[in-house]
Image (cartoon, rainbow, N blue to C red):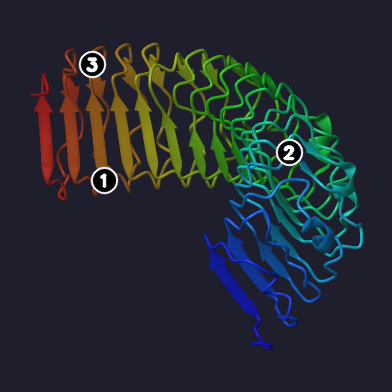
Amino acid sequence: MTKLRLLQVEHAKVSGKFVHSFSELRWLSWKRCPMNFIPSNLRKLCVLNLSYSYITESWMGWNYIKVAENLKVLDLSGCDKISRIPEFSANLPLEVLTLRYCTRLATIDTFIGHLKRLVKLDIYCCKSLMHLPKLPSSLEYLNASRCKMKSLPTLSNLENLEVLCLDRCESLVEIPTTINALTRLKSLSLDQCHHLQYIPRLPSGLKSLKANYCTYLREISAFLDLRNLEELCLNCCFSLTKIESLEGLNSLQQFEINYCRSLRKLPKLQGSKELRYLEFNDKVSLFEIEGLEGLYSLEKLIIEDCHLLRVIGNLSDLKNLVCIKILNCRKLSEIEGLEGLYSLEELIIKDCHSLRIIPNLSDSKNLVCIKILNCRKLSEIEGLEGLYSLEELIIRSAIY
């Protein structure tokens, strides 16, 4: 098999250097390879996958990997015997290095900063890794989720970075302010960074920010000039008391802010003309929702368990709104401006015990479903005449 290009072996134990003759091999995948396996002929090899193998930092095969002049992809996922990656030459053309679930890996030496072609580094769930060295400027993707780092290296040199994942870095206490220099950053994920208290100013090109379950996060002033942000998720940030401003999020399409129990006031969303989905949920302590007017693209609005909320401001600008659900807002006494909602198809209001009037619905000719459930003080629903598309109308005092 002198012309063999791809060899895939899994869970096998083979004696001898049987790959020595495969001089044309480009792709070698040997999951769970034994410690005595030595890939001696790697001259033309481009991809090497030794995931879930038993190799250690003293494995003899490292000497051959170091001189693999065409190696672009190295996958060592699940090699949980490795505590340190031996130094590679700066001339190694490595583009992708995957070290996922290397749970004993405690050190990545500074050589990694000299790998000039490295575009993807995946160190997900390297639970013993507490420090990252300076990374190469060529990097486009970094997944450091579930690592034990308390801080990050300076990020200002990562001019090509597009995706940064730091989920469940539970020891992380701060994000460097130099993150603002990452002009190509598109996605930042900080889910379950429990000790993170502050998010600094972010680069204007960012499209997605996820900071769910950041339970110590108290204040966010990071949204200035985020004109390209499309997705914003801040669920379960229990300590969040203040969002400085949400104006200028011109491209925002999805905004989730559920279970933020300390947040009292939501700033104006004016300018978010692309927003299609907006949800507030579960004991959010909001007593005021400002500036929903101008959200011309909003299609679905859900407000649930906002026990202190008294007034929902003017909704008449929301011409594309298809669905409104207002659930268990017990002190809600007024909903302003339901007239002009020409696209509305579904209206559900449940357990809003203080609500007395549902204003004029006569413009909502496309309404198919109206459910008014357990609204004890409700005395009037305006504009039901002329709702020719209505198929389901339920008004009752309790749910059975």
Q: Position of residue 14 (x, y in %)?
A: 59, 66
Relative to residue 322, is residue 248 drawn left or right? right
- The N terminus is located in which quarter? bottom right
Residue situated in front as seen by the camera: 76 or 349: 76
Relative to residue 260, is residue 158 drawn left or right? right
Q: CA distance from mark 2 to mark 3?
A: 66 Å
Mark 3 and mark 1 lie on one chain; the one further toward the N terminus is 1
Relative to residue 148, is residue 297 drawn left or right? left
Three-letter residue code for mark 3: Arg
Q: Are marks 1 and 2 in contact (CB under 8 Å)?
A: no
Q: Position of residue 118 (x, y in %)?
A: 80, 57
Relative to residue 357, is residue 181 drawn left or right? right
Q: Nearer the viewer's eye, disc 2 or disc 3? A: 2
Q: Position of residue 381 (x, y in %)?
A: 19, 27
**SS category of the residue bearing label 1:** loop
Q: Which residue is mark 3?
A: 356
Three-letter residue code for mark 1: Glu
- Disc count in the image? 3
Q: Which residue is mark 2?
A: 83
Residue situated in front as seen by the camera: 46 or 362: 46
Residue 356 vs 188, above or below: the answer is: above
